[in-house]
């Protein structure tokens, strides 16, 4: 997909515009995404690019979201921590001329998921959840699920995410509920 020079351009941009912690996280997600892509038969190059750029807008996002042409529900518009997925999908199109729908979708939905979720989007969603820098309580369990089955890992990840949001009193985007319902139907 992208040659070393192009990857170098992406990394240089990220180093300049993200904190060191966020840059390290982005590289870790890219590496996890490649591992998952190889395990589950997705394009490893696309997984690396989507994983690397998934948080490209994490620290510069509100203005991009307010002008987004993507489908953004009202709940997402009110949830500032979710802006970076939408903003990142917009930003990579204008900044890096990336228009591959799989990569755009993977960046767009890496925090909220979506119904009929494409494989690459699932991979980046999970890679973000299980990357080497993650240390939340159930991360080891999530990593195990990711090794066993993409579908099982997604279902467990969505249950975890929804439960966490409910416990914190946060709203849940419609796309997350659609993703959950898809995986719940498939797990029966």
Image (cartoon, rainbow, N blue to C red):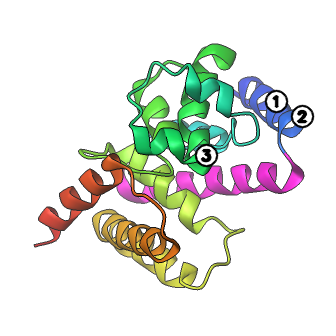
Q: Is residue 175 magenta?
A: no
Q: Quadrant of residue 116?
A: top left
40 vs 44, left or right, is left
Q: Secondary structure at mark 1?
A: helix
Q: Marks 3 and 1, how far apart in space? A: 23 Å
Residue 160, horizontal then vertical, whole percent: 42, 74
- Check the picture and name the quadrant holding the C terminus: bottom left
Residue at which label 1 appears = 13
Residue 181, horizontal then vertical, whole percent: 20, 59
Magenta portion: prevailing SS class: helix
Q: Please report the residue visible at 48 percent of the width from the left and 69 percent of the height from the top.
A: 169
Crowd around label 3: few <14 · some 14–19 · many ≥20 (10 Å): few
> Height in image: 14 above or below 63?
below
Label 3 with label 2: CB-CB less than 8 Å: no
- Check the picture and name the quadrant holding the N terminus: top right
Earlier in the chain: of badge 3 and badge 1, it is: 1
> Height in image: 24 above or below 148?
above
Earlier in the chain: of badge 3 and badge 2, it is: 2
Whether residue 35 appears in this view of the structure is yes
Label 2 with label 1: CB-CB less than 8 Å: yes
Residue at which label 3 appears = 80
Residues in magenta, as a range: 19-42
């Amino acid at each position: 997909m992208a040659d070393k020079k192009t990857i170098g351009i992406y990394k240089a941009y990220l180093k300049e515009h993200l904190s060191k912690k966020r840059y390290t996280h982005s590289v870790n997600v890219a590496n996890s995404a490649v591992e998952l892509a190889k395990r589950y038969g997705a394009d490893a190059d696309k997984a690396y690019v989507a994983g690397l750029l998934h948080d490209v807008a994490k620290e510069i996002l509100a203005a991009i979201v307010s002008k987004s042409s993507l489908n953004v529900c009202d709940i997402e518009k009110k949830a500032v921590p979710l802006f970076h997925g939408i903003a990142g999908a917009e930003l990579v199109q204008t900044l890096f001329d990336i228009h591959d729908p799989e990569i755009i979708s993977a960046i767009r939905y890496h925090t909220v998921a979506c119904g009929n979720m494409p494989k690459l989007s699932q991979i980046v969603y999970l890679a973000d959840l299980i990357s080497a820098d993650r240390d939340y309580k159930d991360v080891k369990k999530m990593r195990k699920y990711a090794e066993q089955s993409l579908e099982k890992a997604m279902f467990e990840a969505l249950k975890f995410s929804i439960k966490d949001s409910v416990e914190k009193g946060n709203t849940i985007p419609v796309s997350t509920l659609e993703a959950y319902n898809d995986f719940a139907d498939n797990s029966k």
